[in-house]
Image: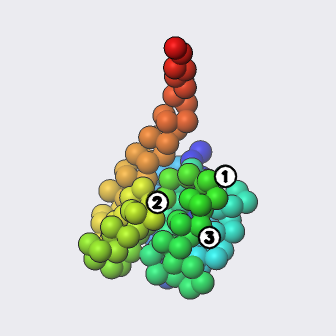
Amino acid sequence: MKKILIADDDRAILTLLSYNFRQNDYEVTIVSDGKKAYDKARKNPFDLLLLDLMMPEYSGIEVTQKLRKEGNFTPILILTARDDDEMKLTGLSAGSDEYLDKTTPMKEIIVRADALIRRNQMYNQAPSETVSN
């Protein structure tokens, strides 16, 4: 079963996302602020982190930056109500793997989450090539 951490300060969004991901065979952990997301992601292995952009304590971008600096390369999908190209570029530059707005259909969010996990698993299972002289 795929493990996902969902962080959003909007209880209705958390409920909607967690329900839909559970219906698609995900083990879901939810938190309501960026600090809790950061702490959980550091201490527990997840297949995907789904982070709201604007949260109390740390933003989704701050969580992403902190985790990447520590060498945590769990796939990160930032989901936001702000459809702003500049913020999208900032989020992707910070190290997120995907950036979607909350108007994205739920089915697409889940398909993109599946794709991020699949790519990460393929990357981690790929045999390392040795270069010899």
Q: Quadrant of residue 88?
A: bottom left
* Residue furthest right as drawn: 43
Disc 1 designates what residue?
45
- Residue drawn at x 64%, y 76% is 35
What's the distance in space between the residues labelled 2 and 3, CA to CA? Answer: 16 Å
Disc 3 designates what residue?
37
- Residue drawn at x 44%, y 40% is 119
- Residue drawn at x 56%, y 59% is 68
| Element assignment for label 1 | loop
Q: Which mark is drawn over residue 66?
A: none
Residue 78 at least partly seen: yes
Tell me which label, 3 or 1, sits earlier in the chain: 3
What is the three-letter code of the residue carrying label 2?
A: Gly
Disc 2 designates what residue?
95
Residue 52 lies, with reference to residue 55, above or below; the image says above
What is the three-letter code of the residue carrying label 3?
A: Ala
What is the three-letter code of the residue carrying label 1?
A: Pro
